[in-house]
Amino acid sequence: MKILFLHSNFPAQFRHLATALARDPKNKVLFGTKRAEGQIQGVQKILYSPSRAVNPATHHYLQNLESAVLEGQAVYRMTDQMKKMGVIPDIVFGHSGWGSTLFIKDAFPKTKLLCYFEWFYHAHGTDADFDPAEPLSLDDEARIRIKNSAILIDLYSCDKGLSPTRWQHQQFPPQLGTKITVRHDGIDTDIFRPNPGAKLVLPNLNLDLSDVPEIITYVARGMEPYRGFPQFMETIAILQKRRPHLHAVVVGENRVAYGRNLPGGKTYKEFMLEKLPLDLSRIHFTGLLPYNQYLQVLQASSVHLYLTRPFVLSWSMLEAMSTGCLIVGSDTAPVRELIQDGVNGLLVDFFDPEKIAARVEVALDNPADMAPLRVKARETIVANYDLNTLLPQHLNWMLG
């Protein structure tokens, strides 16, 4: 069996699938990507690169589509080289929306095309108009509709698709969503597991919180409104005034992964540090961390704060739950799919740092009462999102 994975950021959602398939000597596993870094044993990486950047003169409704077409064109040219080498995959599995899968049915008409459908965009009712402080313009509404163009082509072209949560699947048009199976990628619960009494010591960052009694953790790809970073920072400012021994640890990059940048080039981290009276000796920005250090952060967490707009659910929340973290999460649809307030976590108003801080304090002041929530959080992941259970299901779905 010849399998080609496509994702611009190797290996992303396909790490476990590619690794498992590559273990079978009967399979030839290839991975088309723009990312040169990283390897998986037995997986042949093929790099592609768009021929140019999006033309700034392109109509702004169409810039996302042009970017997708350029990426699809680069993959199409990559497949031409594959065909010249006699490599025709039996299965192509790619992430939809960025363009890599757009022309696969033209390149390989008889090949089964599988697409990973993470999100379908709506101007109203989900992420885009969630914050009343950021009203949408007419241009925003039109641009968001056109942003689905590449995804709709993939929905038409693919043989079948996959979406990781029910909430995310619900965003797709019902008449096309029938092609999509709901199944999460899976969390490695053998790695992400509790370690009672764990201490957080990261020597390479000169960070030693081994004697700190209260550690609030926050994890996201970037520091931005989509993941409630401003509200998180305001919450920490409140808590620092009330709790002199509390420290916060922020894992992620100082960038915007989703949504809009601030005008003038300032980052949200810079903006919030200027705005708030914070004790900088008690808030620690680690940047991205390797898995062993990231795991230490979760295992040492007193409270893990996860805030998100109604958008794609972060793997980090599930990894934190699997580690037995006490989650204080936003009362938004993607979080409610997994967390029941007072059962396996605590839910809070995304927009209210005072109420968030109050809920965090309740959690910190009542560790014995919160212990069952930690246990239930892990049980939720083990029962429904365990990689050991889901990986064989994914493989059967792919190869079936």
Image (cartoon, helix red, strand yellow):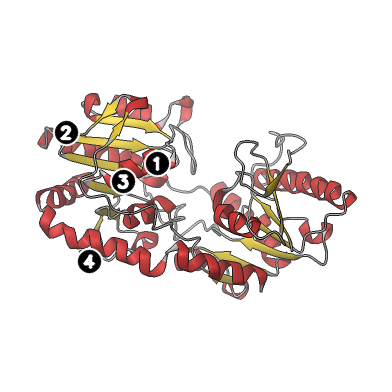
Position of 68 relative to 164 (above/below): above
Disc 3 on helix, strand or loop?
Answer: helix
Position of 270 relative to 73 (above/below): above
Three-letter code, disc 3: Leu
Residue identified by numbered label 1: 292
First in sequence: mark 4 vs mark 2: 2
In the picture, the disc for residue 298 is 3
Q: Residues within 10 Å of mark 1 (few under 14, many from 20)?
A: few
Q: Nearer the viewer, mark 3 or mark 4?
A: 3
Q: How far apart are labels 3 and 1 at the CA level?
A: 10 Å
Confirm or deny contact between disc 3 and disc 4 (CB under 8 A).
no
First in sequence: mark 3 vs mark 1: 1
First in sequence: mark 1 vs mark 4: 1
Q: How far apart are labels 3 and 4 at the CA level?
A: 20 Å
Does residue 104 appear to the left or right of 20 in the view shown? right
Q: Residue at x 60, y 39 (%)?
A: 38
Q: How far apart are labels 2 and 1 at the CA level?
A: 20 Å
Confirm or deny contact between disc 4 and disc 2 (CB under 8 A).
no
